[in-house]
Image (tube, rainbow, N blue to C red):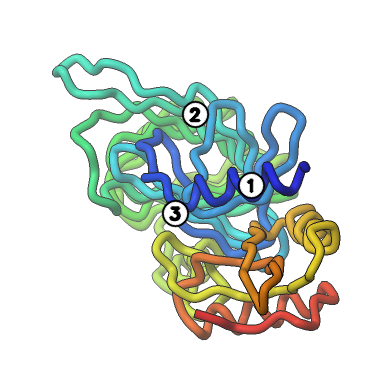
Amino acid sequence: MRLGIGLMMLLALATAPAAASTLTVEGVVSPAWVERGGARLPLEVGMALKDKDSIHTGPGSRALLRMAEGSAVRLGENAVLTVDDLAEKQGIRTRKLVTATLDVVRGAFRYTSDVFIKRPAERDLRIRITTITAGIRGTDVWGKSEGERDIVCLIEGRIAVHHPQAGEFTMAEPLSFFIAPRKAKPLPVAPVDRKQLERWADETEMKAGGGAARRGGRFRVEVASAPEQKAALADYDRLREAGYPAVIHPVAKEGAVEYRVRIVNVPSERDARAVVEKLKSLGMTEAAVSR
């Protein structure tokens, strides 16, 4: 009964139009999860994120999130991002005001305004990188929270920065960065060279052929199939616990029903092959590319 109800819900979600959301998952390289109200769910394309959600990425993972006003938030591997104060309110110019505090607990992130087609809206966003808080309006900024230090790098635009020891100041010089060691005084803002920026940016980029799932992806990976619901559910649960957004699809075959466990929304054959290799390392030896 549990699986039957679940299948009906999955089919309904597959055919329903996507609702507007303040923060939505646009792309993900699994494994990745969202922790919500004590539950741990696999991060999946199209998922609407909520206030107080905590996003976790695993080894080799990436996540691409879309804010309602058109900006993009990218996360690198082994990162933790907690969402707070997420809301859409009435702005002072009759437009919507999108608010959020993005708490980078661990790992690398990048925030870039106006990446996606946006709805008319204002933004009031803050990014906390453990000891550094950056107020965001419209800009391109990279940062990282790691064991010994916190980093914020301004690529374009301007940010208002606060640090307990350095106080409040504005970064408005493109290609500049601020480093705050955990056990020493923060360093002065300094220019960053292009090669270092490229290395940092690479930590949050979702590369073609890296095993991503994206909105509108037409390829899929057939992970396993079974003639019984119970066997399909075991594979489904195992994948989702491992951070892969598996779905179950019933297929009529020779007068019976076969239950297929799939990973969907994969944008290319190269990405699908990369997903297959990852799944084989989990013991899913039947995994194969399909379209």
| Amino acid type, label 2 | Thr
Query: Residue shown at 78%/80% (left/top)?
Result: 280
Quadrant (top left, top right, bottom left, bottom right) of the N terminus: top right
Element carrying mark 3? strand
Residue labelled with disc 3: 26
Q: Is residue 106 visible?
A: no
Mark 2 to mark 3: distance in Å? 19 Å
Q: Nearer the viewer, mark 2 or mark 1?
A: 2
Name the residue that disc number 1 marks: 145
Within-10-Å neighbours for mark 2: few <14, some 14–19, many 20+: many
Q: Nearer the viewer, mark 2 or mark 3?
A: 3
Instruction: Classify mark 3: residues with Cα within 10 Å, few (<14), some (14-19) or many (20+).
Output: many
18 and 79: which is toward the camera:
18
Residue 101's disc is 2
**Disc 2 secondary structure class:** strand
Residue 65 at least partly seen: yes
Circle 1 crowding by C-alpha within 10 Å: few under 14, some 14–19, many from 20: many
> Pointers 2 and 3 in contact (CB under 8 A)?
no
